[in-house]
Image (cartoon, grey):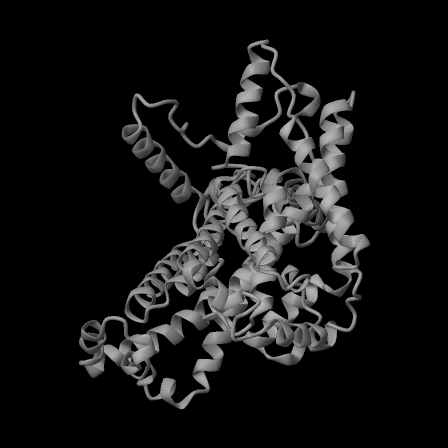
């Protein structure tokens, strides 16, 4: 058969499947690799996807306060740690922070004149004033733990922490530095969104509005706001706040842990920073209440929500970065030590009387060289590796459990309960939300069984969607850039 007689759809072998059709030829010639228009479209699609991801990130950061359960655990953890410390040292409070203690009031005045730290205990050397400040520190810690007026209590909690710790800087075991820093960051978080009396009050008010019931407006908040405003005005007019520099306290606390590399920032912070921050927070609380009470549209409240969400998310990021810095710095400093390099560093504190509340247990742990070596090297590995595992959820959770277990062992074996509690509270910022919600459910059920028949039981933790505003006008909060 000649070539003229062959089927035009077949090739030389007579197989019609081996000859490309017109559509196949067009698809080959118009492939993305050979078409400039398609290449430009592909690049445009890539940029559009990046823009969409960026827009979603902006919307989320401005539209909600991230990590509500994590910040609630941090609030409860540090409030409980500081409260237990104050209660345990209550019989010795005068020797530690009182005007007649070993670190006398005159020495404290000289120290404050040099480092410009804030402490309300330097305002007067009377025993009555000391007892008032100590009692307010205890009360603010308890109320912050319960979540009653969390924004106000976080400020009072900060004042109590700074007043006592800066009065006598030699009283502490390392955990005081962590509490010092986290007390500052907590002021800027919305840490009462869940597991708080504030959340319960707002939920009950929302349920009453949904049923069409009338409820009395909040009177405790305005009264508390007015009283604190009068106290703040009196302290400002008396010149008591001019000696305090809030962020310099944070820098000086970090210098003790991380070195003097941040000391140059202290001269940037003027002496009027503390009163400006306190007055700003006081005014913001008043504005928040006024907008919620008198605003006729939702836009002012939405704007305040966006600002509060930005401040909360920024503070939450700083808390996470601070925890990573603590572990990374501690791990890299340990690597440079010869005892950590040869695997014997853990052995020595176990045989110090000051760190051996249970000598039998210390001897049992240090009796085996292999155990000491594994704990020594394991501590360094976990501390150095943890910041690099934050983007791998499974590995991060394993190392997080290891670090919390390590701090629990330190609390018992070395007799450092408050240091360990402070570090565990700081670690809680990385706990998974699903685990925290299950934990809240367990606590709620346990409380319900314990107090069944006594009164209203604690409700189950709500889903994230249940915190959405009820009206159509309030459904969106945040920017959609």
Locate residue 311, reporting x and y percent.
68, 48
State left or right for residue 5 relative to residue 475. left
Query: Which residue is rendered at x = 43% and y = 48% of the image?
Result: 432
Locate residue 227, reporting x and y percent.
70, 39
Of residue 290 and residue 45, the one placed in the foreground of this image is 290
Q: Across the whole image, how many numbered discs are drawn on residues?
A: 0
Locate residue 420, reporting x and y percent.
39, 63
Q: Quadrant of residue 307?
A: top right
Q: In this view, which residue lies farthest toward the top?
A: 212
State left or right for residue 28 relative to residue 145. right
Locate residue 360, reporting x and y percent.
18, 74
Of residue 303 and residue 74, the one placed in the foreground of this image is 74
State left or right for residue 76 relative to residue 470. left
Reply above or below: 120 against 155: below
Task: Tell me if residue 40 can be seen.
Answer: no
Of residue 374 and residue 355, the one placed in the foreground of this image is 355
Task: Tell me if residue 457 can be seen.
Answer: yes
Reply above or below: 242 against 443: below
Q: Quadrant of residue 443?
A: top left
In the rendered image, the quadrant that contains the C terminus is top right
Query: Which residue is rendered at x = 33% and y = 33% of the image?
Result: 447
Of residue 160 and residue 270, the one placed in the foreground of this image is 160
């Amino acid at each position: 058969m000649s070539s003229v007689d062959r089927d035009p759809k077949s090739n030389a072998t007579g197989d019609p499947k081996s000859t490309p059709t017109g559509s196949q030829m067009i698809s080959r010639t118009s492939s993305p690799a050979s078409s400039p228009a398609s290449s430009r479209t592909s690049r445009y699609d890539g940029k559009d996807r990046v823009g969409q991801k960026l827009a979603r990130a902006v919307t989320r950061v401005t539209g909600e306060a991230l990590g509500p359960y994590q910040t609630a655990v941090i609030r409860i953890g540090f409030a409980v740690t500081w409260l237990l410390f104050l209660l345990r040292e209550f019989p010795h409070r005068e020797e530690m922070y009182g005007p007649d203690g070993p670190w006398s009031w005159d020495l404290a005045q000289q120290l404050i004149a040099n480092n410009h730290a804030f402490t309300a205990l330097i305002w007067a050397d009377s025993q009555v004033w000391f007892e008032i400040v100590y009692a307010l520190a205890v009360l603010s810690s308890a109320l912050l733990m319960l979540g009653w007026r969390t924004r106000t209590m976080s400020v009072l909690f900060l004042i109590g922490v700074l007043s006592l710790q800066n009065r006598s800087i030699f009283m502490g075991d390392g955990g005081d530095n962590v509490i010092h820093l986290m007390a500052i960051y907590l002021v800027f978080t919305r840490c009462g969104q869940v597991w708080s009396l504030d959340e319960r009050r707002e939920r009950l008010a929302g349920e009453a509005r949904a049923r069409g019931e009338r409820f009395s407006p909040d009177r405790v908040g305005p009264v508390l706001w007015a009283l604190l405003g009068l106290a703040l005005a009196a302290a400002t007019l008396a010149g008591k706040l001019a000696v305090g520099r809030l962020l310099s306290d944070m820098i000086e606390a970090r210098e003790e842990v991380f070195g003097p590399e941040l000391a140059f920032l202290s001269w940037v912070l003027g002496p009027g920073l503390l009163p400006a921050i306190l007055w700003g927070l006081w005014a913001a609380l008043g504005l928040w209440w006024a907008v919620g009470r008198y605003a006729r549209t939702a836009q002012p409240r939405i704007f305040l929500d966006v600002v509060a969400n930005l401040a909360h998310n920024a503070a939450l990021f700083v808390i996470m970065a601070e925890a990573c810095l603590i572990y990374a710095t501690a791990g890299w400093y340990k690597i440079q030590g010869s005892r950590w390099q040869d695997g014997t560093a853990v052995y020595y504190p176990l045989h110090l009387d000051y760190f051996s509340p249970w000598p039998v247990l210390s001897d049992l742990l240090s009796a085996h060289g292999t155990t000491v070596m594994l704990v020594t090297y394991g501590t360094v590995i976990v501390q150095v590796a943890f910041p690099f595992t934050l983007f791998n959820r499974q590995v991060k959770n394993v190392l997080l459990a290891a670090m919390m277990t390590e701090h629990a062992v330190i609390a018992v074996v070395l007799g450092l309960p408050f240091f360990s509690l402070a570090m565990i509270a700081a670690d809680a910022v990385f706990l998974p939300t699903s685990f925290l919600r299950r934990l809240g459910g367990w606590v709620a059920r346990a409380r319900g069984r314990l107090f069944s028949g006594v009164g209203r039981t604690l409700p189950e933790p709500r889903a994230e969607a249940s915190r959405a505003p009820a009206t159509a006008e309030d459904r969106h909060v945040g920017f959609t850039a």
